[in-house]
Amino acid sequence: MTVSPLVTNQDLDPARLRQAFGTFPSGVVAVAAEVDGALTGLAASSFTSVSLDPPLVSFSVANTSKTWPDLRRARHLGLSVLADHHGAVCRRLAGPVEHRFDDVAVTVSDDGAVTLDDAVARFDCTLYREVEAGDHTLVLLRLHGVDHGDASPLVFHRSGFGRLVG
């Protein structure tokens, strides 16, 4: 077996890191709320469960995000685990703000949390804590409600969308 040496610090350019990070497949979530009367949301591929007691999840958002400053003001946030048929929805959530929810069936809770009706899992959350971490912010959310089905999740891998085969 041939083992190549690890790349050292001088070779940790952003393009190389993005390529290496992309070798790890992840699910994709929509984080959304009704803010000032408008549906507001973003997509994140950094979602993870954190704690059962208290019930916490997390995702990371770029510090340059123009959407997160609005979302973080919401009383409640909806978090939807995207299904394998949501590739176009995910791209839309990264596109122009005024079209992010075009033709997307959503539910808005009394507290303003927005979730996709046909998501794999849906969570009602509030902001628990934010941790600055380099060029991103790690966002911890406290869960207040959950619903899930048995659809297959959307998978983000090597900068593209796919599905689980099983």
Image: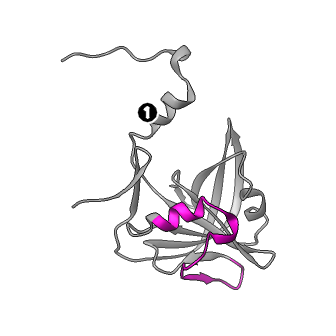
Q: Which residue is mark 1?
A: 20
- The local secondary structure at tag 1 comes to helix
Q: Quadrant of the N terminus?
A: top left
Taking the magenta stretch, the answer to whether it contains residue 14 is no
Front one among 82 and 95:
95
Residue visible at 69% across and 70% down? 98
Residue range in magenta is 88-112
Determine crowd level at label 1: few under 14, some 14-19, many 20+ residues with C-alpha closer than 10 A: few
Where 9 sits versus 17, above or below?
Answer: above
Where 108 sits versus 47, above or below?
Answer: below
The answer to whether residue 71 shows anywhere in this view is: yes
Taking the magenta stretch, the answer to whether it contains residue 104 is yes
Taking 74 as reference, is 103 left or right?
Answer: left
Residue 91 rendering spot, x and y as whole percentages: 52, 61
Q: Quadrant of the C terminus?
A: bottom left
Front one among 15 and 32:
15
